[in-house]
Image: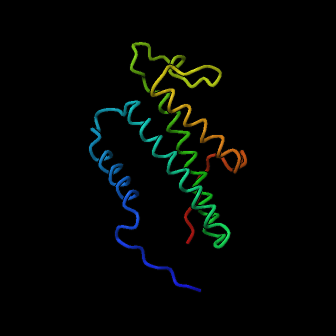
Amino acid sequence: MIPPRPSAPDAHPYLRAATAGVRHHARALNRAASPDRGHLDTLHAHLTELHRFIDQLAEVAGPPHPAAGRHLATAHTRLWQATTELHSAFHLLPGNTAQADTETSACHPERLPEGPPVLTICQRHLATGHSIRRKTTPTDLRPHTTACVR
């Protein structure tokens, strides 16, 4: 068996940059102000891309390392749950219009949303939802907590 190579310091510069960007915004967010829809839309886009990346990692790691693949698949599912909650929070925040009731800001799959960013977040969420439903069962998607066992 070949021992794993240590990763070079610049092996994953874009992932480090994305992490630094999220960290920067978390520090810069004024604690007195509530997040706006723009923050949640951007964070939702980040999470859905991270979701896709973890899915690919789970597929690659699964066959040679089944235990690691199972943990990555679990992380994939938990990340989807977080993305769903973020999408729900997005719709509960008031929009840019004067009418901010839940009827106008809710996600209605049977009709087109009110436009950007609602259009983009709902389309992105729907596309990611199709992906997750092909690989998981409804039981897997139920929210629950687990303890870390080492």
- Between 62 and 35, which is closer to the camera in this rendering? 62
At which x and y percent is residue 101? 48, 16
- Residue, far top: 98
| Image position of 12 with respect to 150: above or below | above
Q: In screen coordinates, is 70 left or right of 23? A: right
* Placement of 111 over or under 135, stated as above or below: above
Q: Position of residue 132 (x, y in %)?
A: 65, 46
Q: Measuring 29% from the left and 49% from the top, which residue is drawn there?
A: 24
- Viewer-closest of 16 and 95: 16
Residue depicted at x 64% and y 63%: 70
Query: Does 62 sit above or below residue 39?
Result: below
Q: Residue at x 34, y 70 (%)?
A: 9
Q: Position of residue 138 (x, y in %)?
A: 72, 45
Q: For the N terminus, which image quadrant? A: bottom right
Quarter assignment of residue 29: top left
> Where's residue 35, x and y in %?
36, 34
Which image quarter holds the C terminus? bottom right
Judge from the rendering whether residue 111 lies leftward or rightward of residue 24; answer left or right: right
- Tally the numbered discs: 0
Give the colour scheme of this rendering.
rainbow
